[in-house]
Amino acid sequence: MNDPIAGIGSGGRVTLAHGGGTAMRDLIERLFLASFHPQGFPVQEDQARFDLAALAGHGDRLAFTTDSFVVEPLEFAGGDIGKLAVCGTLNDLAVGGARPVALSAAFIIEEGLELETLRRIVTSMASQAAAAGVSIVTGDTKVVPRGACDRLFITTTGIGVIAEAHHVSIAAARPGDVILVNGPLGDHGAAILCARGDLALGVSIESDCAPLHDLAATLLAAVPQVRAMRDATRGGLAGVLTELAEASRVAVTIEEKALPLRPEVAGLCEILGLDPLYLANEGKLVAVVPQEAAEVALAALRAHPLGAGAAIIGRVADAGRAGDVTLLNRFGGHRAVTMPAGEQLPRIC
Amino acid sequence: MNDPIAGIGSGGRVTLAHGGGTAMRDLIERLFLASFHPQGFPVQEDQARFDLAALAGHGDRLAFTTDSFVVEPLEFAGGDIGKLAVCGTLNDLAVGGARPVALSAAFIIEEGLELETLRRIVTSMASQAAAAGVSIVTGDTKVVPRGACDRLFITTTGIGVIAEAHHVSIAAARPGDVILVNGPLGDHGAAILCARGDLALGVSIESDCAPLHDLAATLLAAVPQVRAMRDATRGGLAGVLTELAEASRVAVTIEEKALPLRPEVAGLCEILGLDPLYLANEGKLVAVVPQEAAEVALAALRAHPLGAGAAIIGRVADAGRAGDVTLLNRFGGHRAVTMPAGEQLPRIC
């Protein structure tokens, strides 16, 4: 078998030359396009094009979302920056009720990055995108001198289509609604902490990094009147719930004993004094549904491979001050959950 | 007047805290949203949404394109990274025949960036977008520790709509077609070289950074049968013409004496031994039109403020080897123009 990247680099590394000309064309054709379009690829325009009538066959609204990924380290238990970049943007489409259609991917590469590392990451992106049935249709490559960026940053942007029936919004929660999550909290944050290796904890926790579009579609099919969905990434569950409470002008209450948490993540939080409510996730969907649909929603989530650990974790209060989020603890007490003041773990995603 | 960024930062600089939580929300609301949506902004979902029927009212195809910007220095004569990020993506939409609709903007910020610098750049983005009639509708903010990136990188992604009548493609040039450009070559590359200050040349050249959507629309209105358009950025005119010749499987000939070039750029090229064919542009459109439409195309370009210096620079040969680009020099000789081997000026855009 030919090695697709043999001869691309110099000493197996990306060089400044790859930022343009024939060297960049080789890198793009032999690595990016060969991975993202294994069946062959058309002439590369500066833009991808989609038939609007075909898009309109899937719904009435186009969704459009972007995220940059700067995670450190690039590879960790359960994922890598490429998987994160594809899943993160798929998830931002999915939680708005959109069926993902396509992604763009823009790479900022530090001179000297090992081509083998880049290949693993690009392969990971390609396999996540293929599994989700979306194409990476357009992109960009920049190479910056050593020291101008830390190895690799990826920005993905996604487009998707929202079906007529669905109207989910972070501002749509109403008193009495029930709040669910699809599984244990904090796995991604814990995985990155472990992967950084500063802690010598002797535990390895896998990131929950996963594409949520199919889970979100399953939930919407079972409960078309889903009010709100949001993936709990930076800022964790606390970040999502405080945003929800503010945007919907409601008060929210969650129960500590209902929060799914892996013992190893709970242990890590205890040792380090971290609050799992604030730990990042990359495969966790917070959903708000009308009370009468709560059990159907829970059953739909649990029947999906990514929702086996789903739980009802709280509700939108009938009264209370708009924007307040309250945690009822195991001992019957309660405490206010506030939006974190800043980012506690830089480069978590 | 209140200072919108007073109190956002610590010592007037972006801190790691701005990567999440209330500090990020303040930065986003008080700087990004206040600049991009001065009339007020709706609840921020994780995605922007567009009515597909309304989009279909402007054409039959959606265009989608992305670019990362890593230019150094951040500010230079004639522009800054923000203007570049907006114009660059508008131009990638425009040269495909699309009417730009909206942009996303993802910021990767180094801890310690001066908030005043960020404000100038964001203001520049907002004014370019407003002048083009497009909104920056969604975005992302990441802050990385000192040393993990060089001050600021911006990735913009654009969506636009292509009208039924237009079918421009880098693969559509045909023998006999005429090649035009809207003005002098190499200004952006020369401006960045001067701005880096390494050369102590005592000249200041302004970047040609400009949004080309209106010029492209003007040309398409005058000559609906435009075959191909491409903005000549990294790789310069040589990069565009070699791509065109390869994609369209044609030979291309250009005349040196027909190439528009400012005396100061010509002088810089002479001193430094640079070839203006390879210098970057950020406001130059290369257009290919059928021979019978050449004069109409030239007149349409020249009647536009961004096309006053337009010229017919060459043609697609009736014969010759597919992929070949030939320059006829002032003395009647000719030389082959090849795609550059790599990027000669890292961080040019």
Image (cartoon, coloured by chain):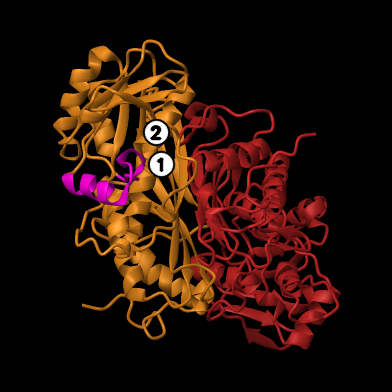
Chain colours: A orange, B red
The location of residue B114, given as percent across then percent down, is: 67, 56
Measured along the vertical axis of the image, is residue B158 above or below residue B231? above
Please state which amino acid type lies under the numbered disc 1.
Gly
Res. A98 in view = no
Q: Which residue is mark 1?
A: A235
Label for residue A250? none
The location of residue B131, given as percent across then percent down, is: 73, 41
The location of residue B311, given as percent across then percent down, is: 77, 64
Do the numbered discs 1 and 2 sit on residues whose CB atoms are within 8 Å? yes
Q: Residue at x 43, y 56 (%)?
A: A347
User: What's the magenta region?
Assistant: A263-282
Please state which amino acid type lies under the numbered disc 2.
Val
Measured along the vertical axis of the image, is residue B323 above or below residue A323? below
Majority secondary structure of magenta residues: helix
Q: Chain of mark 1?
A: A
Give whichever of B96, B219 is nearer the camera.
B96
Q: Residue at x 30, y 65 (%)?
A: A197
Membership of A281 in magenta stretch: yes
Q: Which residue is mark 2?
A: A240
Q: Chain of mark 2?
A: A
Q: Dot 1 lies on which element? A: loop
